Image (cartoon, grey):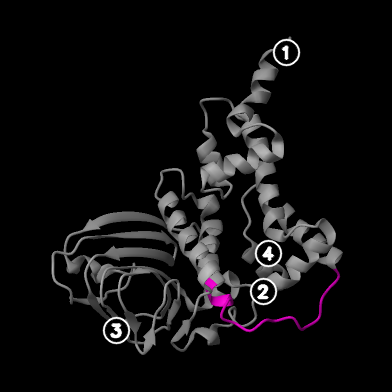
Amino acid sequence: MGQFLLVDSRQLDSFEGLHQAVHGSHVDVMQLGRGRLRGTLSHIGIGDFSLSIGTFNVGMRTQRISSDDKLIIGMLLAAEERVAHWSFDMQLNDVLVIPPLVEHDGVFHGASAYAAMRLELNDVTSLFGGEARLSDPDTWRSRGHFRADPASGAIASRRLVRIMSHLHSKDGLTPSTADFWKRSIVECMAANIISSLPPDDGGWLPSARRVIHKVEDHLAETGTRPVHISEICDALGVSRRTLHRAFREVFGIGPVTFLRHKRLCVTHSILRESAPGTTTVASVAMQQGFFELGRFAHYYQAMFGEYPSQTLGVAPRQLAGLPH
């Protein structure tokens, strides 16, 4: 069954626009600050999963009486003044958990920005695969607050905003890459949550080469679509820490770098075999999970010694010059 894809963005000119602050969920909103509200509200929907990002320039009181069984995980992206949810005072990039069927109460004392993803509770098992606590649905049945690490939290927050921005491009969100982008969004939230959890250095460590062989078998089954690290953790039933140790031991690089190299190789092959005018570098890059085109071009040139635009259509042009 295919996944329903939604991309929507609009400008706000009143607090009523924030009633749909989280896609698929009604929120009661009261304006606290003086002045005409200005802001934006953007949604990305992939099946039953959604990401919403909102910005507004005045203080707000938000209340939500849950009418469904969806889990909401939010992140504070920006705030000029105090922000409180229930009894939690939020700092920048902190993560908030709103469990299914639990009423929510929040106060933004000034201009703010937030991100919120809404998903099925049972989806955490695969989306947070490999992280024992986070992949357990029971972890998310009570409201919670995770304090973000200042440095890594800021990186995760910026990445989340950039993903949203790039997925609004016409080439950004396709059915074949939808799962990768969903996992990339979850990863930004997970990065800030994991920094609050105690280290997990215990447990049985399987053979590094056995782990690598299983990873490569999984990658072979997926074909040319991009694969996210959380998908591998879920499929193999291993933690990110185990994957990292295995890849470091075998290749001397981490799994994220390895997966990026694989996606670069797939991109190179697609560009080389495509005829100019039938595709663009940007569309192929997005299909392979690269959303920052400047950084992608840098990675590509460093790896292959040429820019992607130079690779595009090389093979068809060479074949065209061969005698028949």
For marks 3 and 4, the one nearer the N-term is: 3
The answer to whether 107 appears left or right of 256 in the picture is left
For marks 2 and 1, the one nearer the N-term is: 2
Badge 3 crowding class, 10 Å Cα cut-off, few under 14, some 14 to 19, many 20 or more, is: some
Badge 4 crowding class, 10 Å Cα cut-off, few under 14, some 14 to 19, many 20 or more, is: many
- The alpha-carbon separation of the residues under discs 2 and 3 comes to 32 Å
In terms of depth relative to the viewer, which is nearer, 270 or 197?
197
- The alpha-carbon separation of the residues under discs 2 and 1 comes to 51 Å
In terms of depth relative to the viewer, which is nearer, 87 or 80?
80
Q: Which residue is mark 1?
A: 322
Find the magenta span and give its range. Answer: 192-207
The residue furthest left is 35
For marks 2 and 3, the one nearer the N-term is: 3
Q: Is residue 76 visible?
A: yes
Q: Which residue is mark 3?
A: 65
The answer to whether 80 appears left or right of 193 in the picture is left
The answer to whether 239 appears left or right of 187 in the picture is right
- The reply to whether the C-beta atoms of the residues labelled 2 and 4 are less than 8 Å apart is yes
**Secondary-structure class at tag 4:** helix
- The alpha-carbon separation of the residues under discs 2 and 4 comes to 8 Å
For marks 1 and 3, the one nearer the N-term is: 3
| Quarter of the image where one finds residue 313 | top right
- The reply to whether the C-beta atoms of the residues labelled 2 and 1 are less than 8 Å apart is no
Q: Which amino acid type is shown beneath numbered disc 3? A: Ile
Q: Which residue is mark 2?
A: 130
**Secondary-structure class at tag 3:** loop
| Quarter of the image where one finds residue 133 | bottom right
Q: Which residue is mark 4?
A: 232
Q: Which amino acid type is shown beneath numbered disc 2? A: Gly
